[in-house]
Image: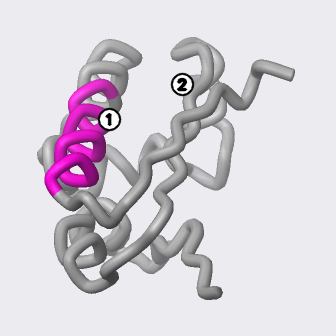
Amino acid sequence: ADAYTQIDANTKPDYSFPQIEYLENIVLGVKKATFLLPFRNMDNWYKSVREWHMMKMRLARSNITGLPQGKGKTLKELSDWFCWHVERVRDIVKRNPGHVLVEYDIEDP
């Protein structure tokens, strides 16, 4: 079985997040798949985004579906986008009955 995990590219000046940009194509390209959607406390998630390999800057500089370039500089902007993204993933997977969505809390032992 194949597994695709973090497939974004950290290339300057543009950063690529194909798992977000091409989500619908990925879903349509595979008949059966299990998608994993991790969650965590939003404050802890934001802290990770700020501290992990310039992720906050990468998100703000990119033009990501649902998060226009220049947005994503604050906890509120990123939280709103993340919640929107979660709903988008749920909707896309739901519309494709061969797929399963597993949501889990990474802070829940």
Near mark 1 (Cα within 10 A), the count class, few <14, some 14-19 or many ≥20, is some
In x, y percent, where is residue 4? 55, 76
Residue 48 position by quadrant:
top right
As displayed, is residue 21 above or below residue 94? below
In x, y percent, where is residue 90? 28, 40
In x, y percent, where is residue 80? 26, 21
**Residue bearing mark 1:** 86
The mark nearer the N terminus, 1 or 2, is 2
| Residue placed most toward the observer, 45 or 38 | 38
| Residue placed most toward the observer, 107 or 90 | 90
Please state which amino acid type lies under the numbered disc 1. Answer: Val
In x, y percent, where is residue 49? 56, 37
In the drawing, what numbered circle is on residue 61? none
Q: Please, what is the dominant secondary structure of the magenta stretch?
A: helix
The part of the chain drawn in magenta is 83-95
Near mark 2 (Cα within 10 A), the count class, few <14, some 14-19 or many ≥20, is some
Secondary-structure class at tag 1:
helix
- Residue at 34% over, 31% down: 82
Q: Is residue 69 visible?
A: no
Distance from the alpha carbon under mark 1 to that under mark 2: 15 Å
Residue 64 relative to residue 102: left or right: left
**Residue bearing mark 2:** 46
As displayed, is residue 17 above or below residue 25? above
Q: Is residue 53 visible?
A: yes
Residue 43 position by quadrant:
top right
Residue 11 position by quadrant:
bottom left
- Residue at 72% over, 31% down: 106
- Residue at 29% over, 76% down: 26
Please state which amino acid type lies under the numbered disc 2. Answer: Tyr
As displayed, is residue 84 above or below residue 24? above
